Amino acid sequence: MSVRELVVLGTASQVPTRHRNHNGYLLRWDGGGILFDPGEGTQRQMLRAGVAAHDIDRICVTHFHGDHSLGLAGVIQRINLDQVPHPVTAHYPASGQHFFERLRYATAYRETVRLTEAPVAADGPIATTDAYTLDSHRLSHPVDSYGYRLTEPDGRRMLPGKLAEHGIRGPDVGRIQREGSLGGVPLDAVSERRRGQRFAFVMDTRLCDGVYALAEGCDLLVIESTFLDEDERLATDHGHLTAGQAARVAAEAGVRHLVLTHFSQRYDDPGLFETQARAAGFTGALTVAQDLMRVPVPTRHL
């Protein structure tokens, strides 16, 4: 059975706390897994969350601040130690190539797995598989930062009533799907478009065009909300978002499920982030992320 869910490994910003590890997020997408922003301690959080190195086939790093990338060394070495049987691809800002190399070869180990380096230098598609297209968009932060967006290809939903009306049954259902028409009946007459699901991952950034492009129409949006609204000036100065800003983006973009994360250690009441997000006008499903929680991708619209 296919699984589409977000496994939250860490939710702290620059400084971890007793209850929040540095960043780390695994998106399970059917049989694959994308690890986003493995901060320090990610390997241990994977163990606690029941995530194996074998679950990872792609790594996406938004930028090279330590809370988003210091765990790369341990994760890459664990992938090799466990002799993951499939290739793994790593995406990260091209301007940080030297940081990636330092982390990849931080200590001695035996390389047993093919790790493909695929640095990102511009907006647009960076990977296409049968299951999804992965795009990147530049964000606004003191260092080069990119967000990532996964889009499933649109499909078709067969309509039993229309099939019966045209006398199409059994093997002919598969035939009209493959050939596009059958006996003068076009596929559109017995089916409807099924919109592909969409996921986006937006970390350290001010408000910018890239944030909106990534969030547009998402079923699940994971977005930083480092600060509360009363500290908006501080957020802007340091290249971050507030809870209210993140929620307004989600509301304008038509997001179905919003996940707020990457919280500053200065706040001790997570409920305030939800309160401010709701006050900003977001009415969809809302999760204030906690370490080790799992957030399912919303079921499809019927």
Image: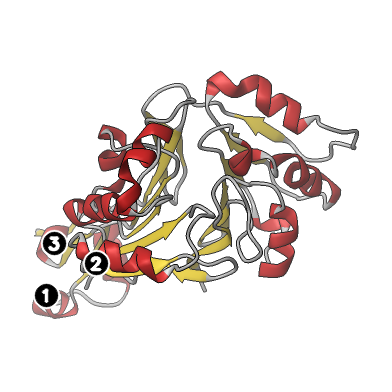
Mark before the other along the chain sequence, 3 or 2: 3
Mark before the other along the chain sequence, 2 or 1: 1
Q: Quadrant of residue 288?
A: bottom left
Mark before the other along the chain sequence, 3 or 1: 1
Tell me if residue 33 can be seen. Answer: no
Q: Amino acid at mark 2?
A: Arg
What's the CA distance linking mark 2 and mark 1?
42 Å
Mark 3 touching mark 1, by CB under 8 A? no
Horizontally, residue 136 falls left or right of residue 165, namely right
Q: Quadrant of residue 206?
A: top left
Q: Amino acid at mark 3?
A: Gly
Q: Nearer the viewer, residue 265 or 166?
A: 265
Residue matched to label 3: 183
Residue at figure coordinates x 54%, y 71% from the top left: 293
Viewer-nearest of labels 3 and 1?
1
Q: Secondary structure at mark 3?
A: loop
Horizontally, residue 214 falls left or right of residue 51, namely left
Locate residue 165, reporting x and y percent: 9, 78
Residue at figure coordinates x 69%, y 61% from the top left: 45
Which disc is residue 162 wearing? 1
Residue at figure coordinates x 30%, y 68% from the top left: 275
- Whether 32 is drawn above or below 168: the answer is above
Residue matched to label 2: 278
**Which quarter of the figure is the C terminus placed in?**
bottom left
Q: Secondary structure at mark 1?
A: helix
Residue at figure coordinates x 69%, y 47% from the top left: 40
What's the CA distance linking mark 3 and mark 1?
14 Å
Which disc is residue 275 wearing? none
